[in-house]
Amino acid sequence: MYSQALNTASTPADTSEVATRFQIRIDAEERIEPNDAMPDAYRRTLIRQISQHAHSELIGMLPEGNWITRAPSLRRKAALLAKVQDEGGHGLYLYAAAETLGVSREELVDQLLTGRAKYSTIFNYPTLTWADIGAIGWLVDGAAIMNQIPLCRCSYGPYARAMIRICKEESFHQRQGYEIMLTLCRGTDEQKAMAQDALNRWWWPCLMMFGPPDRQSPHTDSSTRWKIKRFTNDALRQKFVDATVPQGLHLGLRFPDPELRCEDGHWVFGTIDWDEFRRVLAGDGPCNRERLAARRKAHDDGAWVREAAQVWAAKQTPGRKAA
Ligand code: FAQ
């Protein structure tokens, strides 16, 4: 754990005076740093959101990892390997940011592995063809950027700073995905059909990534007041649709939504199947069990690395024993 030196007590109790002073700082756009006084609810919200985000990055490596050994060329394989490694790195920065709030990475990882923590529903869908790798980069990373650029201005310093680098990398990921889709769409009829099929399967789950509609989002009000979230779920979803539909039309693809139409400069879309979202969130998506099982196996297989690192660290500090 990196946070031993941090003051993690919720200082000094959550009186209304503390809350008022805290809100004045937030309204003045001041950054909150780990040792600053903060209401418990603010701390808990950040731990929840940052850790869910970290888990999503780690589980998000799995659908694409499925295609590393089957990438169609050495160039594609190298780019995909680098992308998946970036995602592992994002998970680590985010766990480190969460640790500054007084929770240990071990505890957070344990919550994930024991099924007590949430991660993005999008990563419980299968990657059936190579076009899915293009669709994930274009759409999933595209949605992630739309949601995460505003987090670079989040009120909590360590999270905001981690997001700057993450967004730069996500932006590269989005471009490599779009370029895969472009290549497929300019290829044979079969390749274009593969790209269309991937769009058909990923479009609606991507719209769910932004979270429930605003009126059903329990955290939006407090998170926007605290400037953790700068936009609501529905506002970001609409920005994503407006940015992405013209990109899909440029590819010559059709969106799987008969109600999609442009009105007053915005793309109006059909009704999202929130029952599907709730089912996947509850653990009953197409790949939930497979994803958690793969993550648990990776964790178990890595036990010797953690053990060796602890023994090595103990040797560097005389008198300190491996935990
Ligand atoms: N999946 O009141 P809200 C990526 C939960 S990273 C699962 O609206 P909030 C990179 C929510 O947690 C993708 N759960 O909550 C990549 C809450 O549950 P709780 C992840 C969801 O926090 C690309 C409940 O519903 N990105 O893609 C989802 O204000 C390619 C009520 O919801 C982030 O985590 C969902 N989609 O807003 C990697 C960004 N949506 O805790 C590999 C940071 C909602 O009460 C390949 N997070 N829930 O039990 C956020 O911006 C926010 O947390 C939201 C949700 C917008 C996701």
Image (cartoon, grey):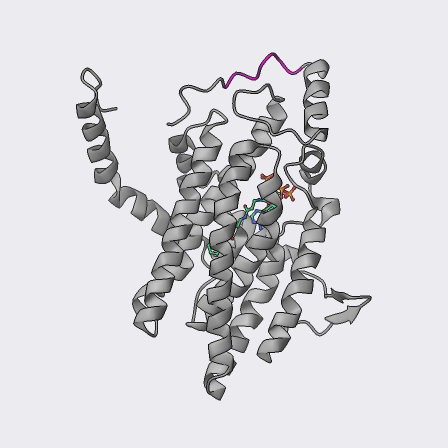
The front one of 75 and 118 is 75
Residue that sits furthest to the top in the current view = 12
Instruction: Note whether residue 194 is visible.
Output: no
Was residue 268 drawn as part of the magenta stretch in this picture? no
Image x and y of residue 150, in percent: 62, 46
Point 25% across, 45% down: residue: 301
| 31 in relation to 54, above or below | above
The front one of 105 and 293 is 105
Image x and y of residue 195, in percent: 51, 76
Range of residues picked out in magenta: 8-14
| 321 in relation to 137, above or below | above
Relative to 23, is 172 on the left or the right?
left
Image x and y of residue 37, in percent: 59, 18
Point 58% across, 14% down: residue: 11
Point 43% across, 34% down: residue: 96
Image x and y of residue 142, in percent: 56, 59
**Dividing the picture into quarters, in which one does residue 307 lie?**
top left
